[in-house]
Image (tube, rainbow, N blue to C red):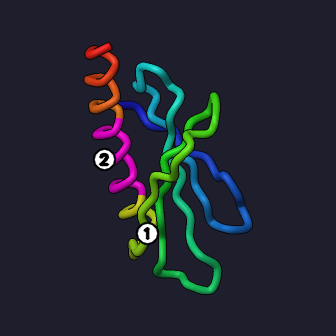
Amino acid sequence: MGRAERPACPNCGAVLTLLADNPTNDYYVVTSRRLGSPNRWSWEIRRKSKPMGIKMTEDGFQSDLAAQFAGNRALTDFLAELAKEEKRK
């Protein structure tokens, strides 16, 4: 999958990771680091069109790269399950 990254918040260390091959191109992963805790990275899946209604997040990663990897894997799994659900309708 293609991936584009850009700073989401230059002052807080957050990075957006967008999956270009996403069929709906509506969901994306944001990674961020807690201030004062350099080894505490997290990821969150978000939707562009409207809020998801739930938070899909995980934290405790030791690097931005580790959080990006885990977040992208979670997004891929989520989109696969979402596609299965759409086929059932």
- Up-down relation of residue 33 to residue 28 (above or below): below
Q: Which residue is mark 2?
A: 73
Q: Which residues are magenta?
A: 68-78
Q: Amino acid at mark 1?
A: Asp
| Number of numbered discs visible in the structure rendering | 2
Q: Amino acid at mark 2?
A: Arg
- Up-down relation of residue 44 to residue 4 (above or below): below
Front in this rendered view, residue 4 or 33: 33
Q: Which residue is mark 1?
A: 59
Helix, strand or loop status at disc 2: helix
Which residue is depicted at the point 48% across and 47% down? 45
Helix, strand or loop status at disc 1: strand
Magenta-highlighted stretch: main secondary structure? helix
Would you say 4 lies left or right of 50 here? left
Magenta span contains residue 73: yes
In the rendered image, the residue lying farthest to the right is 11
Q: Classify mark 1: residues with Cα within 10 Å, few (<14), some (14-19) or many (20+).
A: some
Q: Earlier in the sequence, mark 2 or mark 1?
A: 1
- Up-down relation of residue 20 to residue 53 (above or below): above
Quadrant into which the N terminus falls: top left
Spatial distance from mark 2 to mark 1, Cα to Cα? 14 Å
Q: Position of residue 49 (x, y in %)?
A: 63, 28
Quadrant into which the C terminus falls: top left
Q: Position of residue 74 (x, y in %)?
A: 33, 48
Front in this rendered view, residue 85 or 73: 85
Q: Classify mark 2: residues with Cα within 10 Å, few (<14), some (14-19) or many (20+).
A: few
- Name which quarter of the figure residue 36 lies in: bottom right
